[in-house]
Image (cartoon, coloured by chain):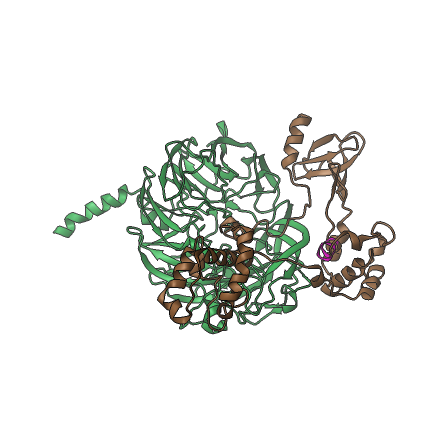
Amino acid sequence: MKIRCLLPLIAATAWAQVLPSADILKPKPDSWPTFHGDYTGQRFSPLKQINTTNVASMSLAWIYRAVMNPGANIGGPGPDPSPTATANIAGTPLMVKGILYLTANNNVWAIDARTGLNLWHYTWKGVPSVALGNRGAAIYGDWLYFETYDNHLVSLDIKTGKERWNKEIADVKMDYFSSMAPVVVGNHVIVGVGGDLLDIPCYVEARDPETGEVQWHYWTTAQKGDPGFNTWPDQEAAAHGGGGVWYPPTYDPDLNLLYVVTGNVNPVMAGQSRAGDNLYTCSVVALNPDTGKMAWYYQYSAHDTHDWDAAQTPVLINGTINGQPRKLLAQAYRGGLFYVLDRTNGKNILTKPYVENLNWYTGINANGQPIRDPNKDATVPGSLVSPSSNGATGWPNPTFSPDTGLFYVGTSQNFTIFYLTDTDPHPEGYGASERGGGTLTSELRAIDYKTGNIVWKRKTGVGAQSLMSTAGGLLFGRDGYNNFIAYDAKTGDPLWHSGLLANPSNGPITYMLDGRQFVVVGAGENLYAFALQGTNVK
Amino acid sequence: MSKRILLLTLSCAVLANAQVPAGASGRGGGGGGLGGGRFKTYEPAAISRGLPAYTTNCASCHGATARGGKTGPDLIRSSVTMHDLDGVQIGNTLQSAVHQNAVKLSLPANQVYDIAAYVHSRVIESSGRGQVHTADVLVGDTKAGEAYFNGAGKCNTCHSVSGDLKGIGGRFDAPSLQERIVMPPRNAVKGVPANSIKATVTPATGPPVTGVLMRQTDFDVILRLADGSLQSWTISKGVPKVVTTDPLQIHYDIMKSLKDSDMHNVTAYLAGVK
């Protein structure tokens, strides 16, 4: 009887939550509740009010300038932030129930999604960030979660922006930093930490959404006793092996597997003290989100020596290979190769370069992995390598449209000279320098996921870029000359563009409010919203 | 658009085909190099005093460069060092029972400070990218480089060691020379890039216009004309037609297949052109 009485109460509580679990699992069309919009990482929206036939008349709805607000909620130790501080918007905003949640390093803003007016602002006073950007936030129930640069997971009351608690997830003095957008899976807040300079071992963790306490902890470099430890020469190397987690994982609820992508090895470019494959760096690792146990892994580049992390989106596709329905994972790896895996077991299905002129491997092995050419490691007199450490693409997200079957990615074909500067048997840090070289071309490319073939390409002035595709037949991207562009997703023809005050700098999103579809993108310190005007809104 | 507004806009514009410096886009996280501004920099005098003090008191266990030795741990990738400020934590560790049982050391506070300054300088050095020296790069065969320059590389098609490259070996150190062999810079001379891309725009009506390409997108093109003024056109469905000429295109073409040995040999050859 008691249970019967409680059920309506539980249901009412869940109903009242800003974002219940069910709405994370199956996002409502009027929302963008997670980093990628949903768990697949496709960055594909089913919205189609704005489409190929009418996008030419899309225009500006509002602009929001992300600056320090007087009266902001302030957390953390340290000096007050400068009142004139400005943001570089690299994170993808979330949109839930008419409110946008935007992050930049150590800051969160809540913005009315219809009008662009600020509702609240939270700023963290910890160690000032020198990172490239904060990827974004996560929402669960009535709480927002984000990682500060100095490794604090902060939980805010989503309605007021007031701090609920903060938990240190790594030691900034050891040169850890955090930039990942947390991901909520069930009763877990998944967080990751990275580090660039001084050979620290990195990890991913599940934290309790109520308390912030650790539920499980997974080292991304195999430690003593772990499977894969034999890919390191000794504990010293594994304990300093890097493998930063600075990119949000994707998730398959049916398989209950979390797909974590890992960073490069440390020491970064001087590999003489870390003979072996160096698992699980430069890999995708499938973890059970309830236990942190690894189901399988796939390493895109064994014993990396060029700073080519795997911090790109592992896109989940329910596709067809040789006429058979398959659960796939597709990733355009930074080193220039496009991979398709069976995401149930990690078996390789396809490996193919998505740019030309790669010169760092001699072939592909039976497991679909490139065979590294040691002659193209950094050398003392210099080694001319393509791509540079910038890679053929980077962390800015690709997109996949199930309507076109195409995987879209911003690419660059570039060379640089890698010089080995640390010849010690036990190098530290980067251990090498890059000088010179150049970019042959930068292109937006559309890849057929079944074959890896390039279906169309379009020259741009930028390599890696954050993209979004929609059921309206559109692909949103940029050209490196401050233009935000809507392309025809089938052909790559530009159908609409708008010159902004800076280059678009984050992943675009879209949502529907009051029957009107908005497209939102950040560029520098400004967030822009576009929509159809007047009679075009149907 | 007025010319003034156009000029302001161009100050932010990216030149078409501009090279992307290595490391510009970075990876998912932090800023690279020399601690990314995260580590305290100590005064050079303290570091200079700290090196001999370190060598005398610490190097036998912790190694000549503080990376660790047979009996002492690495002090660079060390939790004590990373949590140290001004030698306080390092000094506490020196006085700890663990350290005193291993090695008895009693150093004045000012010397501990100097040693800490040196160790911290090594942290910053290790977190950087390191230096490339001329002697490291000059490993090529001069004669093979000359043969490539005048033969397979066809460098002499555009260049001459008695003409544009006269004395080149005295003007640049070897690493810079090697960079320029692969890809010369688009030097700005009086505001106009010397190796700039030239373009000819042919409007639907009127004569073709030639100038330096300042920007080319799917939607517009901007040239700097011979008189220094800027002119822009809207591009719609491929009109007007734009034809570009890049004087560095041959370097891009060669870069695709340039062997490291040829690169080193030509560097050795040109380094000798004094």
Residue A193 relative to residue B8: left or right: left
Residue A209 among those drawn in magenta: no
Residue A183: horizontal and vertical position, in percent? Answer: 39, 52
x%, y% of residue B5?
A: 64, 28
Q: What's the magenta region?
A: B174-180
Nearer to us in this view, B187 or A462: B187
Q: Is residue B35 visible?
A: yes
Side (left or right) of B259 relative to A56:
right
| Residue B131 higher or lower than A35, as above or below | below
Q: Nearer the viewer, residue A137 or A499?
A: A137
Q: Position of residue A233 (x, y in %)?
A: 50, 73
Q: Main secondary structure of the magenta part?
A: helix
State the green chain.
A
Q: Colour of chain B?
A: brown
Q: Position of residue B261 (x, y in %)?
A: 74, 65
Residue drawn at 74 percent across, 39 percent down: B242
For residue B179: magenta?
yes
